[in-house]
Image (tube, grey):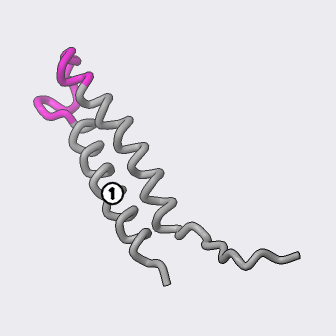
Amino acid sequence: MEDNKSEEMLSIWNLVGIILVVYGLIITGCGVYYAINGIPKIISNESNPSLWWGIIILISGIIFTIFGRNKKK
């Protein structure tokens, strides 16, 4: 027997957004940890690239997730 319930597939944009949010949280967490505990700044001189890239990835993941949820028919 078939159910009359309509099954909706998860949008690829939503899936990519969720993955980017998870990675962004991990990388931002590492950046905050390094900012608090202080790491030797040999390559990056005075910047904290893991913090900045983590924030950028997190924001892009949120944007992808929002657009993935709004794409329903």
Which amino acid is tagged 1? Answer: Ile
Q: Residue 8: percent from the left, percent from the top?
A: 61, 73
In the displayed orientation, state which residue is furthest to the bottom: 73
Identify the residue at image location x=42%, y=69%.
69
Please name whichever residue, 24 or 47, is drawn nearer the observer in this view of the structure.
24
Q: State the residue position of label 1.
A: 62
From what the image shows, is residue 9 above or below residue 57? Answer: below
The magenta segment: 33-48
Q: Main secondary structure of the magenta part?
A: loop
Specify the quadrant of the image occupied by residue 26: top left
Magenta span has 31? no
Please name whichever residue, 71 or 29, is drawn nearer the observer in this view of the structure.
71
In the displayed orientation, state which residue is furthest to the right: 1
From what the image shows, is residue 62 above or below residue 72? Answer: above
Q: Residue 60: percent from the left, percent from the top?
A: 31, 58
Please name whichever residue, 65 or 50, is drawn nearer the observer in this view of the structure.
65
From what the image shows, is residue 19 above or below residue 35? Answer: below
In the displayed orientation, state which residue is furthest to the top: 37
- Taking the image as shown, residue 58 lies to the left or right of residue 41, namely right
Specify the quadrant of the image occupied by residue 47: top left
Q: Residue 66: percent from the left, percent from the top?
A: 35, 66
In the displayed orientation, state which residue is furthest to the left: 46
Identify the residue at image location x=88%, y=75%.
1
Category of crowding for the residue at label 1, using alpha-carbon neighbours closer than 10 angstroms: few (below 14), some (14–19), many (at least 20): some
Magenta span has 42? yes
Identify the residue at image location x=47%, y=63%.
14
Please name whichever residue, 73 or 36, is drawn nearer the observer in this view of the structure.
73
Disc 1 element: helix
Q: Residue 51: percent from the left, percent from the top?
A: 23, 37
